[in-house]
Image (tube, rainbow, N blue to C red):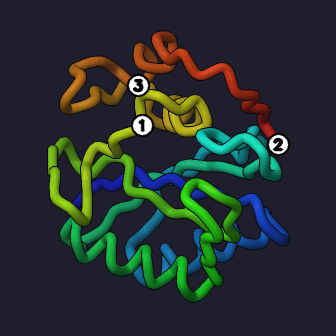
Amino acid sequence: MNKAYIHLGSNKGDRMKHLLSAKMYIDQYVGQTLMSSKTYNTSAWGKADQPDFLNSVILVDTILSPFNLLKRLQKIESIIGKEKESFWGPRKIDIDILLYNDEVLSSQRLIIPHKYLHERNFVLIPLAEIAGHLVHPVMKKTILELKVLCLDTNTVEILD
């Protein structure tokens, strides 16, 4: 079995419903959720003039390869109704693979670890909650260390 850390985000429509739907579909089509962070309300990153996001991170046990995992997650985004209006713009759901085992992968379709993981508090804070001890396979620092070093100043507040 493979361990995949997956980020879920939503800032359009019923944000909580979209996150819960994504988790349900992931359990159904990807693998068993082993851990889930709390849900966080966060200001938008990259393109600030949009509604706040709800974000969480889950750990999933899966038999899927990285590329098959990506295909399943994109299918789940499609089912929920991902309709990206612009790059980093508002969306019902955004699902990203953050880490996959301790693998490093770089292709046109998929980069693991996620290339912005270490720059985003809305990812680092929920990831640190469930896997602070985990070592980033490229940066060779723990998630907690990366969180401390992160220069992102966007607001990240626990919702639940």
Residue closer to the observer: 76 or 31: 76
Crowd band around label 3 with a 10 angstrom C-alpha radius: few (<14), some (14–19), many (20+): many
Q: Mark 2 = which residue?
A: 159
Q: Position of residue 54 (x, y in %)?
A: 73, 51
Indicate the amino acid at tag 1: Leu
Tell me the SS state at disc 1: helix
Quadrant of the image containing the C terminus: top right
Residue beneath the point at 82% across and 52% down? 51
Residue beneath the point at 39% across and 76% down? 30
Please, is residue 19 above or below residue 117 in the view?
below
Indicate the amino acid at tag 3: Ile
Q: Mark 3 = which residue?
A: 143
Please, is residue 62 above or below residue 129 in the view?
below
Find the distance from the CA under tag 3 to the CA under tag 1.
9 Å
Indicate the amino acid at tag 2: Leu
Find the distance from the CA under tag 3 to the CA under tag 2.
21 Å
Q: Is residue 128 left or right of residue 11?
A: left
Q: Mark 1 = which residue?
A: 117
Please say if the residues under marks 3 and 2 sit with CB atoms less than 8 Å apart.
no
Tell me the SS state at disc 2: loop
Tell me the SS state at disc 3: helix
Q: Is residue 87 left or right of residue 31?
A: right
**What is the number of callouts on the image?**
3
Q: Position of residue 80 (x, y in %)?
A: 63, 82
